[in-house]
Image (cartoon, grey):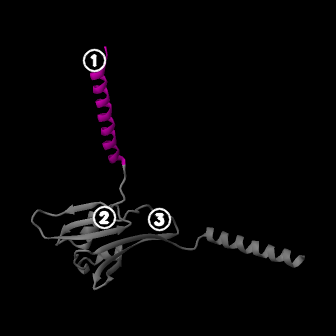
Amino acid sequence: MFKLFFPFALVVVGFVSQKSQAQEVGRVEQIEFNTQPYYFHLQPGEATTQVYIWGSVKLPGVYEVSASTDLGMLLSLAGGPADQRPVTLPGRRTTQIQHFRIRGDVRDIIYEAELEEMLLETSQYPQLRDGDIVYVKSEEVRGFSWRDLVAVLGATAAVVIAVERVLAN
């Protein structure tokens, strides 16, 4: 009986150890890495440029693009500004585009414009070069609203009441 059971036990142990190894390999797919994606947008044999696009775009990361790609095309490849929700009134949304390049030991801004401005002046884009960084900043600019007025009036009333009580004592 032992002679029949021993080979069967080895097969079961081998199967269980293989199954646990397979589960270990499968867990790697569930781990999220903290690296930015790397995108290729080029034709075979073309000269390429490696640029970085960060900030509030839908697909931030490293882009390997053909040397003829301009800033507008790069922003389109990155999916455009990420925050396209309607702006709560009063206020408006501004999207600022900044293009940085290393000059010597310093990273300088070589182009800066609001998105609406940039779309109107397509011939003004600087050519992309290796190591350039494009940063897209989107923010909501709010005006003074009735909620702000209520907050100021409430704070003023609280200070007046506090001063009145201190003077009364």
- Residue receiving disc 3: 87
Say which amino acid is labelled 3. Answer: Val
- Residue receiving disc 1: 3
Rounded to the nearest angstrom, the CA distance separating label 2 from label 1 is 61 Å
Q: Is residue 28 magenta?
A: yes
Rounded to the nearest angstrom, the CA distance separating label 3 from label 2 is 27 Å
Say which amino acid is labelled 1. Answer: Lys
Label 2: which secondary element: strand
Most extreme residue toward the front is: 2
Most extreme residue toward the bottom is: 104
State the residue in front, 149 or 83. Answer: 83
Is label 2 or label 1 in front? 1
* Residue 112 horizontal/vertical position (percent): 34, 80
Question: What range is drawn magenta here?
Answer: 1-30
Label 1: which secondary element: helix
Dividing the picture into quarters, in which one does residue 37 lie? Answer: bottom left
User: Does the CB distance between marks 3 and 1 fall below 8 Å?
Assistant: no
* Residue 50 horizontal/vertical position (percent): 22, 70
